[in-house]
Amino acid sequence: MNTFVAIDVETTGLSPARGARVIEIAAVKMEQGQVIAEFCSLIQVGVPVSAATTGVHGITTAMLAGQPAPGEIWPQFIWFIEHHPIVAHNAPFDMRFVHSELQRLGLSMANPSHCTLRLGRRKYPRLPNHKLEYLAQHVLGKLPPEIQLHRALGDARLTAMVWEEMRRE
């Protein structure tokens, strides 16, 4: 897998089945260990963002005002990822949201997905915590200072770095 796309979503809640929506999507396309392209957007889904959710990722309802609608962003996302494998930290969570958003628009994707959380648990079972930032500290030695955690682009970039390093080991 020389080319893959690391993704991350920020959402209004924990379950699309309960009405939670994606309000930020990021994708980092990697080829031969190098970032070759990035895609990131906030998404105006027309629902308010709770204070508790804002506390997680820092995205407010006001920040979404004037941002593109899902019908504009998701086709661009599909075009960006092409046929490449997807990598995400806790991939089942992210992919459930991605598929839910695509389904709302009558779109779909069949890209295979891989999970840094699952791989991290398998490779490092003795780690007390496998959250992305802790796994990254273990695998990379430290968190890169330019990474903004809990925002989609920062987490997608970090996921790409962690995946690359875990595959090298």
Image: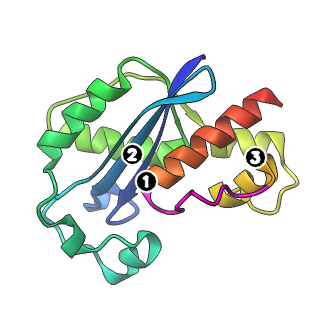
Q: Main secondary structure of the magenta part?
A: loop
Q: CA distance from mark 3 to mark 2?
A: 24 Å
Whether residue 90 appears in this view of the structure is no
Q: CA distance from mark 1 to mark 2?
A: 5 Å
Q: Is residue 85 above or below residue 100?
A: above
Residue, x 20% and y 41% (percent of image)? Answer: 73
Q: Quadrant of residue 75?
A: top left
Q: Is residue 112 above or below residue 60?
A: above
Closer to the N terminus: mark 1 or mark 2?
2
Whether residue 161 appears in this view of the structure is yes
Q: Is 148 a magenta residue?
A: yes
Quadrant (top left, top right, bottom left, bottom right) of the C terminus: top right
Residue, x 76% and y 48% (percent of image)? Answer: 140
Q: Quadrant of residue 67?
A: bottom left
Q: Secondary structure at mark 3?
A: helix
Residue, x 68% and y 32% (percent of image)? Answer: 164
Which residue is identified by label 2?
26
Q: For this rendering, which residue is in front, 133 or 98?
A: 133
Quadrant (top left, top right, bottom left, bottom right) of the N terminus: top right
Q: Is 159 a magenta residue?
A: no
Kind of residue at disc 1: Ala
Q: Secondary structure at mark 2?
A: strand
Q: Quadrant of residue 24?
A: bottom left
> Answer yes or no: do the residues labelled 1 and 2 have beta carbons within 8 Å?
yes
Q: Which residues are magenta?
A: 142-151
Q: Secondary structure at mark 1?
A: helix
Closer to the N terminus: mark 3 or mark 2?
2
Which residue is identified by label 3?
121
Q: Position of residue 23 (x, y in %)?
A: 28, 58
Which residue is identified by label 1?
152
Q: Position of residue 47 (x, y in %)?
A: 17, 67
